[in-house]
Amino acid sequence: MTERTLAIIKPDAMAKHAIGDIIQRYEGAGLHPIAMKMTKLSKEDAEGFYAVHRKRPFFHDLCTYMASGPVVVLVLEGDNAITKNRDLMGATDPKKAEAGTIRAVHGASIEANAVHGSDATETAQFEMGYFFPELK
Ligand code: CMP
């Protein structure tokens, strides 16, 4: 089933100049960027995006971190895009991510974990609308 998912290349991966490598991995897996922008989030932008996590102890640090440098935000389209992207990324904690996954290769810590990817259909809808309200 063709699906869309939202991905973010986070500030740590940007600082490592890993944009090209990460997009190559998406494309190599059949996840095609259909919308993409480089931007710098404000703390408020990050808080709105991660609102589902607002009660978690890591929320404040996560939002401060996501606003600490530029990011690339993409909508990826492909067969089973949500699950496929989660498999490509690996576990949230890079130390637990399977070898060869984006987070295992590029992630530094659970916070600086290189990439974000939507985890379900509903969150993908919310996240794509948050950054690309013009996409239908
Ligand atoms: P992400 O996929 O962007 O979704 C929420 C983010 O919170 C997650 O990746 C991590 O970078 C970050 N985070 C920080 N601490 C934790 C934690 N203890 N558990 C889960 N996510 C965490």
Image (spheres, rainbow, N blue to C red):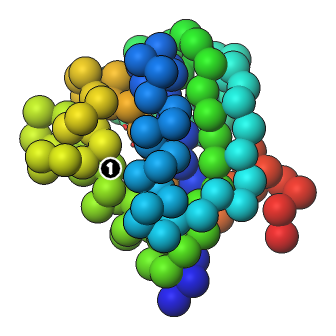
The percent position of residue 13, horizontal first and vertical second, equals 43, 25
Where is residue 100? Give x, y as percent: 19, 47
Residue 126 visible to an observer of this rendering: no
Left or right of residue 117, residue 78 in this image: right
Quadrant of residue 67 within the rendered picture: top right
On the rendered structure, is 53 left or right of 38? left
The residue located at (38%, 31%) in the rendering is 114
Q: Residue at x 48, y 21 (%)?
A: 17
SS assignment at label 1: helix
The image shows residue 18, relative to residue 35, as above or below, that is above
> Mark 1 = which residue?
89
Residue 85: tell me if it is visible. Answer: yes
Q: Which quarter holds ligand 1?
A: top left
Mark 1 Cβ and ligand 1 under 8 Å apart: yes
Is residue 2 placed above or below 64 in the rendered structure? below
* Residue at the extreme right: 134
Q: Is residue 75 left or right of residue 120?
A: right
Amino acid at circle 1: Met
